[in-house]
Amino acid sequence: MAQNITAGRLLTGHCFQLIDDGVMLHETASLFSRVRRFHFGEIVAVLESPDHKFSFQAGNDVITIPIDRHNGEQLAVVETFARAVRASVFAPRG
């Protein structure tokens, strides 16, 4: 399922990557970087703002990534992500 959104500025960057059971977020700030992983079941909210930003909340963390609304591939990643989160919310718990 590997689909990505890459966004960055001069000293910061984000790579949002969909994986089979969740999302990996690669964040770079100046000389530091980190990778965070969230399972779809951990995500409690998905938002798209009018100023071309895509956000999701997992626990107390809110992650925001700028998107290009004219980029069909990025919009497809956001839609696929939102569908996977909805499916995990309504999945039977056992």
Image (cartoon, rainbow, N blue to C red):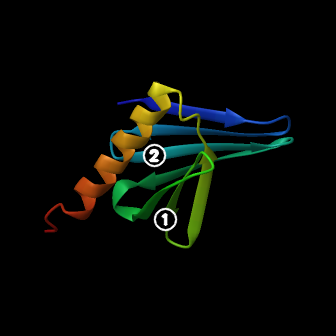
- Give the x, y percent position of residue 77: 42, 36
Give the position of the C terminus as an image quadrant: bottom left
- Image point 17% across, 60% down: which residue? 91
Residue corresponding to mark 1? 58
* Mark 2 residue element: strand
Q: Earlier in the sequence, mark 1 or mark 2?
A: 2
Name the foreground residue: 86 vs 51.
Answer: 51
Residue corresponding to mark 2? 23
Toward the front, the furthest residue is 50
Residue 60 image-quadrant placement: bottom right
User: Quick check: marks 1 and 2 in contact, CB under 8 Å?
Assistant: no
Estimate how packed mark 2 is, as few (under 14), some (14 to 19) or many (20 or more) residues with alpha carbons within 10 Å.
many
Q: CA distance from mark 1 to mark 2?
A: 11 Å
Residue 44 image-quadrant placement: bottom left
Estimate how packed mark 1 is, as few (under 14), some (14 to 19) or many (20 or more) residues with alpha carbons within 10 Å.
some
- Image point 49% across, 32% down: which residue? 74
Drawn side of residue 10 relative to residue 58, left or right: right
Amino acid under disc 1 = Ala
- Image point 51% across, 44% down: which residue? 24
Drawn side of residue 93 relative to residue 83, left or right: left
